[in-house]
Image (cartoon, rainbow, N blue to C red):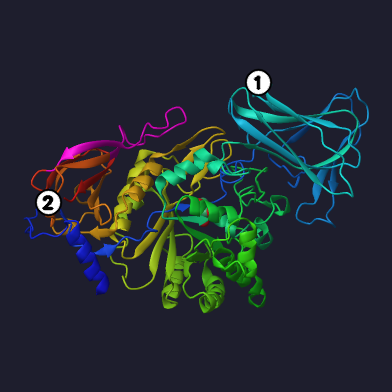
Amino acid sequence: MRIKQLLAASLVSIGFLSATPMLAQNSNTIMVQVNKPVAAVQPTMWGVFFEDINLGADGGIYAELVKNRSFEFYQPLMGWTVTQNKFNEGSVLVMNREEKNTANPRFIRITRDAATDTLGITNEGFRGMGIKKGLGYDFSVMYRQPVAGLKLHIELMSTAGKVIGATTITPAATTNDSWSKASASFNATDTSLKGKLNIWFEGTGKIDLDMVSLFPEDTWKKRPGGMRADMIQLLADMKPGFIRFPGGCIVEGHELSTRYQWKKTIGPVEERQLSINRWNNEFAHRPTPDYFQTFGLGFFEYFQLAEDIGAAPLPILNCGMACQFNTAEVIPIDQLDPYVQDALDLIEFANGDITTPWGKVRAGMGHPAPFNLKMMGVGNENWGPQYIERLKIFSKAIKARYPEIKLVNSSGTDPNGERFDYLNGELRKMNADIIDEHYYRRPEWFLANAARYDNYPRNASKIFAGEYAAQSDHTVSIENKNNTETAIAEAAFMTGLERNAAVVNMASYAPLFAHIDGWQWTPDLIWVNNVQSYGTPNYYVQKLYSLNKGTNVVPALMDGKSVSGQDSIYVSAVIDTKTGDVIVKLVNPSAKPVSKIISLNGAKKLSAAATLTLLKSKEDGEVNTFANPDAVSPVMSTIPVKANKIAAVLPAHSFSVYRIGIK
Ligand code: AHR
């Protein structure tokens, strides 16, 4: 009651309330009742789903340019080539100190015993290295040598094989078998889309090398060893309400031994134990044998990223089950404790006081303040009674210690069918906080299901539309395109998410990133190569919803009904009590323009003009490309508001966002 009074007071203060009578309704008019909020829009409503798929982390947002920097790939010299003008047995030797260092056992030993030999190693990067003219690059390497003798020549090479940046390092002798770090910064003299890193050796001697690393200086927030700024900027521009990490199926692993374990992803990078990326060999039609997780981007960095972009963190943890499409391994119930403990410890790592064991670890990494974790997922796309059995144990333990943490639970892989029905029933019996629903479906499905949530129970579990994307062909087809047909279908569907914000509290498109030369899954929201990144039409749909989130849903009715496909259009509306605006979203997926009158009722006085942000396609199926990244992108204009009405023309294949100020 108190909340209702407060909301009414704020509506009055910004002019939403008036005695304007309801106008007559007809099918040419969309009636928006700005003074009748029906539900709050949660700050988390529109977020992003991050997974290390398609070279999303290593080779993607993690800006490290050297692939296999610590020689831990299953083939220890994958990504590297050795150059020598005279064969010399053992001049580059892969050494393994497994007994002493389980997290980072391998390193290489370079021996150069004849001053006339050419000896060098070259790293090919992740499908090449993106090098930018004039930009600074930070090279570093861990080394060990009892006697100084070798000089390292570091060179950036262009695609054509020209040196486009160089420096040298002469490492000093190290004592007692200990490792030192040598580093040097230098500028690139040219740009290259697919450059390489050469290291060649001068002098004679023997040196051990590990963690050979090269980062550009222009990382996000200029953090050394940080993230690729252009990619993160695209996320920040969306102002996402949350960021889910680290996936996706990567949480589950192909088998339990390769599941995502957050504790192995924090602390000094050279101590983070590499794991195979489950997308390495997932699809025979898109093999990626050089795909591993170095965890240079780990849980600390994910939390920091969330904080940087103002998004609520949503970590998802393994529930004791490996991917059920793969091995479907499960941990016996009597051995589940360490998994549950990982969840409890993660909450302490994120939120605990610095006097707590895990809070102290966080502080030691440079973040004494808590990360303000409020929710956590248990299991990704897990299903069956085995999931429910394990989930109940997790839920009991987490709620007993941290009742304030909301738990996200899996409803499986599909939005309907026996698996979904079983899980949905069980989760509702458990009074689940948030149910995660996934749908990878054709555009027609999105249009036909825009009213999916109209009849979901309001006072029960909330919904997280956790992974969705319209598939122009079919799920896991390599023909799927991020085109306007799929983007506009998603926009139409999202009117239903917004209208039902009373039950849908979160939504995110998936997957987020794809590297043009290293992807396994399409469609994806943002595409990158080594130097460029662009948003797809689907990205702009997500961004427009997020930037026009508002605070409260208001009715937008045609003939007294919500608009979900009548006359081929889809409509939702919100008010923003912070800015004092009413925002109306209209989607026309059809091939013909549609004209409607938007009648804004219940406001004392409206601004004389509305801002229209329009995303439209010249033809269905248009795409953005590296050559033309803004081919489909929002265009702004102003449209008159006369007598509280707007004459709206919705072009074919379009998404329109009208924002009108309340005076
Ligand atoms: O988004 C790609 C994959 O789709 C995710 O990893 C998984 O959760 C879903 O099956």
Quarter the N terminus occupies: bottom left
**Residue 320 visible to an observer of this rendering:** no
User: Around disc 1, counting alpha carbons within 10 Å, would you say few (fewer than 14), some (14 to 19), or many (20 or more)?
Assistant: few
User: In screen coordinates, is 563 left or right of 289?
Assistant: left
In-front residue for pair 212/290: 212
| Residue located beneath label 1 in the image | 160
Quarter occupied by residue 237 = top left
Q: Which residues are magenta?
A: 614-641
Q: Which residue in the protein does label 2 denote?
A: 605
Residue under the point 67% across and 58% down: 264
Given the current orientation, which residue lies at the most extreme right position?
113
Residue at (67%, 42%) from the top-left corner?
Answer: 290
On the picture, is 585 further left or further right than 148?
Answer: left
The dot on residue 321 is none
Marks 1/2: CA–CA distance: 64 Å
Residue, x 23% and y 48% (percent of image)? 569
What secondary structure predominates along the stretch shown in magenta? loop
Q: Position of residue 615 (x, y in %)?
A: 30, 39
45 or 80, which is in the foreground? 45
**Above-or-below relation of 396 to 523:** below
Instruction: From the viewer's side, name the closer residue of 244 and 524.
Output: 244
Q: Amino acid at mark 2?
A: Lys
The image position of residue 337, as x and y in percent, is 64, 74
Rendered location of residue 325, percent (x, y): 57, 58
Q: Does the magenta-highlighted stretch encompass residue 636?
A: yes
Drawn side of residue 627 relative to residue 193, left or right: left
- Residue 485's image quarter? top left
Pointer 1 or 2: first along the chain: 1
Name the element at disc 2: loop
Q: Determine whether label 1 and label 2 are within 8 Å by CB.
A: no
